[in-house]
Image (cartoon, rainbow, N blue to C red):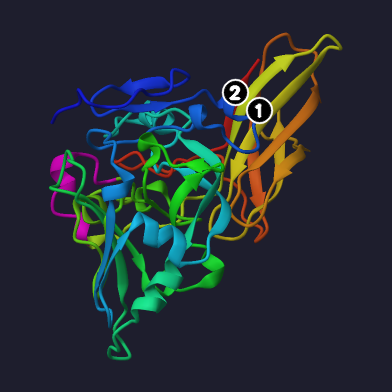
Amino acid sequence: MDFSQEPPHSTLLHIQAKEPFNAEPLASSLSEFPITPEDLVYCRNHGPVREFDEGKYTLAVKGLVKQEANLSMAQIKAGWRVKEVVATLQCAGIRRNEMGAIKKVNGVPWKDGVIANCKWGGIPLRDVLLHCGIQPTTDNEQLHVCFDSYATLCEDDTYYGASIPLERALDEAADVLIAFEMNGEMLSPDHGGPLRVIVPGYLGARWVKWVDTITVCAHESPNFYQQRDYKILPPEIDTKDKARDQWSKYPSMTVLPLNSIVGSAQRTPDGKVFVKGFASPGANGNIKRVELSIDEGATWREAKITYQEGRWSWTLWEASLESAEEHGVVYSRAVDEGGDVQPKDGGWNVRGVAYNAWGVGRW
């Protein structure tokens, strides 16, 4: 793979791997901004970052549709209504380094910065699919929408691909977009420009960057990143060799679990401890409250929510805690609208995904 032609990357990110480029910001920096500035949006790649000429870029829509289409960027921007959605982009490997401290895992040793809350602009995928029309199928056949990027090289397959159920793609309330803007600006190459898929509520692996092909089909994407990666295997499958024949037995990940992270904790001149952080929703509604403990969970105090915007955004929170200790540990846990509570301990899996034990901060 040739990495020599990549555009400049943000200098505010901690580099976890140079080729492919994988980097994340500090959680303390993320906690300062309701909408994540581009320079603090993490970069997750499985191959070289490409820069494309928008005037030559096209999107193919094919498969089980009544009318296939090959759309230019001009057609995409002028042909449909444009919609904006605030949604949290999150890597499945967030906090993998913490899971790896329990037992070795496979993957980039991400800390807690592979998450970003942005305003995405683009056209609803639903509108494009309805324009092309869906071919009738048997009543018991579940269709899927596959997103592919043949424009980029990949480590583990000949292209990057993912899919979601057609039902979610057609749900107006699901806000699935074919996006060309982030925070009011054109999508940059690092974040999938000129086109990427936005699937609010789903893990970032389904938000395919540099998407150039959309296919309606009767099965999930056959791509490596849908079928042999981003799955939660049972803890007894603890090596790559044991996992080799097990991937097909377990479902592809969709929604990441309820989570919270302590971005910073520091003593203040008045003798208190000021704590800030963020929380991300799971499958049962957005965050209802965030609780903090400095006595290992014996007692909890509710934090103040300082930001939350709509169904798909993260939640920023802060609190000033009473403590006479010069140094200590603060734990966070989130509670969602459905009543789910972030667990004390996160489950272990060999891929190191979906870790969501209590957040931990130290002062």
- Pointer 1 residue: 32
Front residue (pair 348, 132):
132
The label nearer to you, 1 versus 2, is 1
C-alpha distance separating marks 1 and 2? 7 Å
Left or right for 288, reference 183: right
Rendered location of residue 244, percent (x, y): 14, 48
Please indicate, yes or no, whether residue 187 appears anywhere in the rendered image: yes
- Residue beneath the point at 22% across and 36% down: 47
- Residue beneath the point at 34% across and 77% down: 132
- Pointer 2 residue: 28
Rendered location of residue 203, percent (x, y): 42, 50
Left or right for 158, reference 200: left
Binning the other alpha carbons within 10 Å of mark 1 as few (below 14), some (14 to 19) or many (20 upward) gives some
The three-letter amino acid code for the residue at tag 1 is Glu
Give the residues drawn in magenta, as a range: 236-248
Front residue (pair 325, 143):
143
Relative vertical location of residue 362 with respect to residue 195 in this rendering, above or below: above
Relative vertical location of residue 342 with respect to residue 266 in this rendering, above or below: below
The C terminus: image quadrant = top right
The three-letter amino acid code for the residue at tag 2 is Ser
- Residue beneath the point at 71% across and 36% down: 317
The image's mark for residue 81 is none
Q: How many labels does the image show?
A: 2
Left or right for 132, reference 3: right
Please indicate, yes or no, whether residue 210 appears anywhere in the rendered image: no
Rendered location of residue 86, percent (x, y): 59, 50
Q: For the residue labelled by badge 1, is the local secondary structure a helix, a strand or a loop?
A: loop
Q: In the displayed image of the protein, which residue is found farthest to the right?
A: 270
Relative vertical location of residue 311 with respect to residue 301 in this rendering, above or below: below
Q: Residue 283: within the magenta?
A: no
Q: For the residue labelled by badge 2, is the local secondary structure a helix, a strand or a loop?
A: helix
Q: Could you say which quadrant of the image residue 275 lies in?
A: top right
